[in-house]
Amino acid sequence: MVTPPTRRSRYAPSVVTKNDLLELLNADFTRECRAIYAHAVFAERLKDIDPTASAAITRGGQETVLAALALCQLIYDYGGIVANDLDELNAVLNADRVAQPGWAVETVRRLHERAGQLRSAGEPGLAKRVRRILAAKRAAKPLDEWVIGRQRSGSK
């Protein structure tokens, strides 16, 4: 008798090797660094036009710095080396990509996946640290809401 294939939940973590997980965590760290640059770019663009929005974006950037630092420490604690392959000029010139509506959702999805993978790898403490980053990201207003809201109102 052939057993039917079991359907895996889309929320089930994929099992990866330690080296693969370190590469994924470094990719997440690079993503956070890209977001830091984008926050700086938009805070500067709006500084004279809308100081309130600029200040809020700056606070969001500071929260992103804290998330990046937490990921950096997590990589070290997991026995890895932080490897950021971000080109700063490219990050500044492409800040609009971070301000796209799907960016924050994709970041949360990736971090949620990372927490599951760490849990599967027998690292519940590290997974808990990723979940703290996730909680902060979910509580914050994403950059795209500040930027797109301004674009819809006709402001530049």
Image: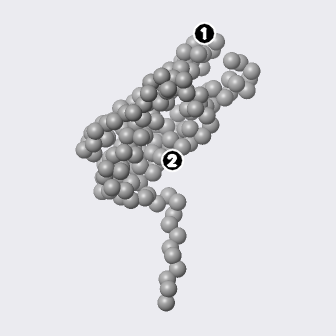
Inspect the image, locate mark 1, and give the three-letter code of the amino acid beneath it.
Answer: Asp
Residue 10 image position (x, y, % from top left): 52, 60
In the rendering, which numbered label is found on residue 48? 1
Q: Which residue is mark 2?
A: 109
Quadrant hosting residue 14: bottom left
Task: Specify which label sits upstream in the sequence, 2 or 1.
Answer: 1
Q: Which residue is more in the foreground, 93 or 110? A: 93
Alpha-carbon distance for marks 2 and 1?
A: 34 Å
Left or right: 110 as drawn, with respect to 68: right
Left or right: 82 as drawn, with respect to 109: left
Position of the C terminus, as image quadrant, is top right
Which residue is pictured at 44% across the width and 27% down the height?
87
Residue 133 image position (x, y, % from top left): 42, 39
Which residue is pictured at 41% across the width and 49% down the height?
114
Inspect the image, locate mark 2, and give the three-letter code of the amino acid beneath it.
Answer: Arg
Mark 2 residue element: helix
Q: Is residue 143 visible?
A: no
